[in-house]
């Protein structure tokens, strides 16, 4: 059975740091090269997306102009849209519902003034920051000051983390 190598003294610790630093420098250089390549490709992709958008906008502006000249009886109309069929597809003009912007403070005030409390949502959440101040951990359980176990809390142990900080 072969024995795995272990650091036995400061010189060996320094040696492993120097070895890994060389590897880390190469990885950092390669990551930088990859990020540069990704940025170059992202620029090319953005140009293509812009070109695609421009082509679609130009097409749609021509189609909208044409659509406005088509007699109403040839279009299929609903509450939210108009359609006109062509062999290659449909020209669809949509009428979206208006965007609703709410000022929740004013809306809440109005609801309360009009006694429509069924339309007010009350959200209960534990005040963990305050509760935590009166708790302690004993034998892997979170308990109150008088020792009562608090339900709904699970402690998940995490392993210690070793860091190396260069000087």
Image (cartoon, rainbow, N blue to C red):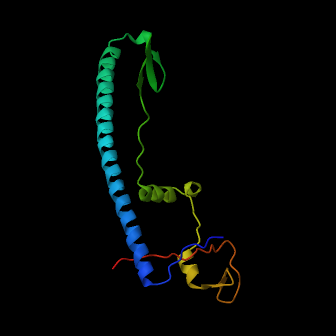
Relative to residue 127, is residue 71 depicted above or below?
above
Give the image quarter of residue 117.
bottom right
Residue 101 rendering spot, x and y as whole percentages: 40, 47
On-image quarter of the N terminus: bottom right
In the picture provided, is 7 more to the left or to the right than 34? right
Relative to residue 33, is residue 72 depicted above or below?
above
Q: Nearer the viewer, residue 6 or 162?
A: 6
> Which residue in the rendered view is the most extreme toward the front?
1
On-image quarter of the C terminus: bottom left
Q: Nearer the viewer, residue 29 or 108?
A: 29
**Tag count:** 0
Relative to residue 80, is residue 130 depicted above or below?
below
Residue 122 rendering spot, x and y as whole percentages: 57, 62
Q: Residue at x 58, y 74 (%)?
A: 159
In the picture provided, is 54 more to the left or to the right than 128? left
Relative to residue 96, is residue 110 depicted above or below?
below
Residue 166 rendering spot, x and y as whole percentages: 36, 77
Q: Residue at x 57, y 80 (%)?
A: 132
Give the image quarter of residue 67.
top left
Residue 77 rendering spot, x and y as whole percentages: 46, 18
> Which residue in the rendered view is the most extreme toward the bottom?
146
Give the image quarter of residue 32.
bottom left
In the picture provided, is 99 more to the left or to the right than 47? right
Q: Nearer the viewer, residue 34 or 65?
A: 34
């Amino acid at each position: 059975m072969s024995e795995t190598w272990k650091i036995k003294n400061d010189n060996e610790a320094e040696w492993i740091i120097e070895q890994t630093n060389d590897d880390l420098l190469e990885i950092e250089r390669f990551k930088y090269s990859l990020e540069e390549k990704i940025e170059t490709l992202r620029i090319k992709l953005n140009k293509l997306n812009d070109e695609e958008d421009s082509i679609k906008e130009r097409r749609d502006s021509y189609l909208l102009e044409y659509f406005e000249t088509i007699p109403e009886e040839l279009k299929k109309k609903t509450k939210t849209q108009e359609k006109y069929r062509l062999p290659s597809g449909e020209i669809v003009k949509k009428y979206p519902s208006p965007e609703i912007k709410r000022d929740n403070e004013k809306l809440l005030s109005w609801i309360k003034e009009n006694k429509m409390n069924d339309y007010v949502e009350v959200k209960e959440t534990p005040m963990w920051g305050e509760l935590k101040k009166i708790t302690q951990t004993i034998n892997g359980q979170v308990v109150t000051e008088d020792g009562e176990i608090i339900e709904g809390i699970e402690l998940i142990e995490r392993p210690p983390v070793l860091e190396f900080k260069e000087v």
